[in-house]
Amino acid sequence: DEPSEKGWIKIADAFSCSSNLLKLNLALEKSNQPDIDYTITSMSTMLRSQYSLEHLTLLFSSTLISDVSLEALGSKLSKLMSLNSITFGLANCFDITDSGISLVMISLGSLSMLSQLCLDLEGCPQITDDSCMKIAEHLEMQVSITNFQLCLRETQATELGRCRLQSVESSRNFSKFSISEDSLNLFQTFLE
């Protein structure tokens, strides 16, 4: 059973007392909490003191998360200057929109150490070419990112958006660049 709302807040408070974490993995997959935005907003406070954090994995697939959560997380992520890699698992989050993705990308702009970015947007019906354009714009500006993975399966993104992203790959040197139509299976990776 997943923790209650109060339980998650207690977990967040505990993490906030420690500032020496290097890696944090958090999975709330398939949670049916109707107030999950409030829970995640509260949980995001755990990130505010993690200035040494280098690797962050956030898996919220198949939850009722919305742009409200992404805005809250983004405001904390922008201060984690040691972050080297971040993974967002947002597959089948029906309430995520282009605005939420834009907020996330803006928050990452200040992270000069960030070299790996993974976004799983599979099955997010409100994601369109606007997200592709914003991601591409961000990748062009943030040259520290050399490993990029994105899943756009079952979104409203068209060939236009995909071509815009591919144009970034051809203009820069990436160690890995992948725009996948297959599930990224992030939760399985998370368990391994």
Image (cartoon, rainbow, N blue to C red):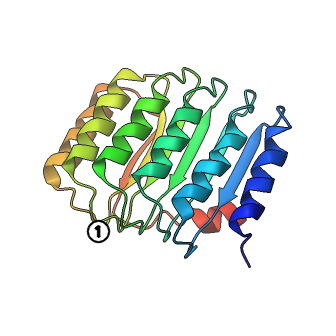
- What residue is pinned by disc 1? 154
Q: Residues within 10 Å of mark 1 (few under 14, many from 20)?
A: some
In the visual, does 141 lie left or right of 16?
Answer: left
Pinpoint residue 179: horizontal percent, then vertical percent: 35, 51
Residue 17 as seen in the image, left or right of residue 123:
right
- Residue type at mark 1 is Glu
Q: Position of residue 78 (x, y in %)?
A: 54, 28
Reply above or below: 59 against 123.
Answer: above
User: How many tags in the picture?
Assistant: 1
Q: Is residue 117 visible?
A: no
Residue 152: quadrant of the picture: bottom left
Name which residue lies at 71% across and 66% down. Answer: 191
User: Front-most of 164 and 64?
Assistant: 64
Position of residue 92 in the picture relative to residue 41 (left or right):
left
**Image-based side of 29 in relation to 98, left or right:** right
Tell me which residue sits at (71%, 73%) in the image: 2
Residue situated in front as seen by the camera: 109 or 151: 109
Indicate the quadrant containing the C terminus: top left, top right, bottom left or bottom right.
Answer: bottom right
Residue at horizontal 47 percent and vertical 31 percent from the top? 107
Which residue is rendered at x = 55% and y = 42% of the image?
73
x and y, in percent, of residue 34 in the image: 51, 71
Q: Nearer the viewer, residue 85 or 93?
A: 93
Decide which of 136, 26 is in the foreground and name it: 26
Residue 27 visible:
yes
Residue 160, image x, y percentages: 14, 48
Q: Please state, as top left, top right, bottom left or bottom right, where the N terminus lies in the image.
A: bottom right
Disc 1 element: loop
Q: Which residue is farthest bottom?
A: 1
Q: Quadrant of residue 19?
A: top right
Quadrant in which residue 105 is drawn: top left
